[in-house]
Amino acid sequence: MAKLTDPLRPVVGDKAAKWLGTLGTGLRTVGDLLTYYPRRYETRGELTDLAGLRDGEHVTVQAMIASVSSRPMRNRRGSIFEAIVTDGRGQLTLTFFGKGRQDWRERQLAPGLHGLFSGQVSTFRGKRQLSHPEYELIGSGEAGSERAVEFATELIPIYPASKDIASWQIADSVRLALAAVEIDDDPLPAQLRNRHNLYGYARALQAVHRPADTRDYAAARHRLKWDEAFMLQVVLAQRRRLSTEYVSLPRPPIENGLLAAFDRELPFELTRGQQVAGATIAADLGQEHPMHRLLQGEVGSGKTVVALRGMLQVIDAAGQAALLAPTEVLAQQHHRSISQMLGPMAMAGQLGGADEATRVALLTGSQGSAARRRSLLEAASGEAGIVIGTHALLEEHVQFADLGLIVIDEQHRFGVEQREALRGKAADGRPHVLVMTATPIPRTVAMTVFGDLEVTELTELPAGRSPIATHVVPAAEKPHYMDRTWQRVREEVGLGRQAYIVCPRIGGQPDAASEEATSASRRPGRGERRQDDEAFGIADDGGFNFDDEDFADSEAETQRRPALSVIDVAAQLQQGPLADLKLAVLHGRLPADEKDKIMLAFADGQIDVFVTTTVVEVGVDVPNATAMVVMDADRFGVSQLHQLRGRVGRGGQPGLCLLVTEAQPGPARDRLDAVAATQDGFALSRLDLEQRREGDVLGAAQAGRRSSLKLLTLLKDEELIGQAREEAEELVGADPALAGQPALAAAIAEMLDADRAEYLEKA
Ligand code: ADP
Ligand code: MG
């Protein structure tokens, strides 16, 4: 008898073991093979007999290969490979055209083998044939035909195969492994299995490979998904638990401090969501263990106020807060708006400053050395209760007197290491951490990717928010719609309002190649940066860049014209349709002080139209801006467009968003129509998630995860993941070290090892 951890070779033989070692990440143990699951199952159904085939029919036939031949094509390079198959009554030709020689197919389709062949029937020179049929080989000789009979009553597992090893060969090895293996342990606790009516592990492995019927394999797969979900959630629950063992200084609210004063002066009423989130955070901050909380809410839901109130509570408790923003524009804007909201409360030591006042310092990579020195000093001395900055905050020489709270805005651009770097700056224990994101993250992703954070949601928008009407402008089919687009912009400006025009590219650089690399139409690889980050030095690869694009189609890509650029579009508009308006450009390549100046002028209403990159994507808040035109809108991701349009309709006036595209009707246009049809960010982020491979989402956030999720899908298995999370919480709460669950502990250790190995291999 073999164990799951035993090597495959003695069980399946040398040759098969060698082949199996080339599959996937390399199948080496009995367990590796038995967790190499079938991709699907062929239901055999009614097989057509060869004598009765009719042209045009789609058929699946069962037959034996009688003979094969191969010849070069006459007029072109390449070869034609033909196999004649028979079921004893009739004959059928299988034809395969290849660009080169098809030796491998000749090795695969050897005479004597039985198989299932499916395709569309046609007639060529009086002979019935299937051209490029799909096939599933069963085996040869006596055994093959026996197996064929067996298969008549069975579901046939179809494995992801390679050109060296066919699905039926994998099935043969699996059969040997199933016969040899002895499984006594079950990683899932018995009580959990009973509660959720799950197959035992041995039965599940048997049934996933050799199901009796469809119900059998569904139950098997369900059970095996549980293994994946549960083990992951146990690891996350352990991590959450570990983090509650860290100690931090409690910062409970006080009665007559800055926070109370701020609340008295607040010009609006907090939404219910803001109140609830505020109370949760206030309670967290009073604990002696660090808070790790994700505050999630649609654009404009008012996350900043919630965070600011937490910061004030920490300041009231003699601590400091750091606010980390992903871009300079955002850091500056936060600095401006927070200073403004605090008014005299942020003017300690200044004329007109309140008694209990603090200071708000700004620290960015590109500020002048005098301003920088002052900020560094204020942070280190504790004079500044709030220090706002970009990644510059992470640098080693930045020190705090008593850092109590770290707020991270728009989390998806920061990686785990960056979070860690900041945490290290607290003198006493660990600071509390609040992560804010406007990108709606489906619950299961939040539970999985951000599984070590508690999640709080702001579901409602403050009163007085206006809807944003979104329309797709098909510029190629209806050029006159463009005139109408510019006219709408002029109308808005005529009413005293402002507009954004967003382009996917900066432009105006001699090095066209490197610009294409930063265009929003393709996903940046590791180490590359998006255009808006180039000035800020934040690489994407550590972060969870949820709204990033991943739709690049390499075929279409080469034929597409370069994306429209800020510089070109601004010049054309200024000379043409928008000649009499005040235009300004804003993008990541401008020097920081200039960016700040332009932002201020726009916020102040001195500029009518902002031509810009996605630099306005996150958090920019100018209530008087009511219109947005997105050029080449098809080059942006769905969630990204949703974020972008969140910049308009922030005041009392309705917002307008026009998505200009030259894309023909098809998938690209459908995506834009979806954005136009709904303002539900969650629905759109699900759409985004569906359109990218799951591994990208997980892989970007947590290296290695993909190897441990084989059957589980984050979107479809939402309910199961939720249940697994509850079960994991309970188990880890009662038995943190899994002392009573040796099989589970071993399986988790193995999973983490495999993940680590894969991660190291990649790095
Ligand atoms: P986001 O969640 O996108 O970061 P902000 O925090 O920037 O949103 O808030 C958007 C705007 O709404 C700001 O101008 C803010 O002052 C305002 N705001 C926040 N909360 C409320 C509220 N309860 N009532 C009215 N306006 C609010
Ligand atoms: Mg914000």
Image (cartoon, grey):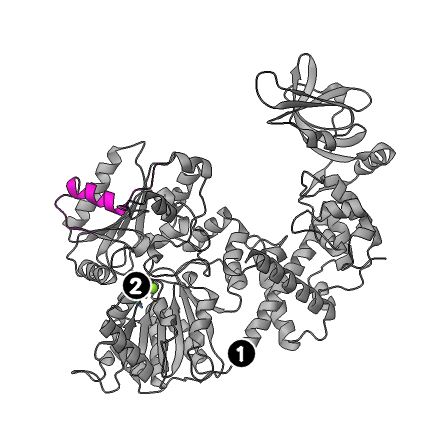
Picture residue at 70% right of the left edge, 15% below the top:
127
Residue 368, label in figure:
none
Picture residue at 44% right of the left edge, 72% below the top:
421
Position of 121 compared to 246: left or right? right
Q: Residue furthest front?
A: 511
Q: Is residue 65 above or below residue 661?
A: above
- State the count of labels: 2
The amino acid type, in three-letter code, at marker 1 is: Thr
Q: Is residue 213 above or below residue 383?
A: above
Whether label 2 lies within 8 Å of ligand 2 gets the answer no
- Location of residue 644 in the rendering, given as x and y in whole percent from the top left corner: 33, 53
Disc 1 element: helix
Q: Which residue is mark 1?
A: 244
Q: Nearer the viewer, residue 699 or 87?
A: 699
For the residues marked 1 and 2, what is the alpha-carbon distance in whole angstroms? Answer: 33 Å
Disc 2 element: helix
Q: Nearer the viewer, residue 521 or 89?
A: 521
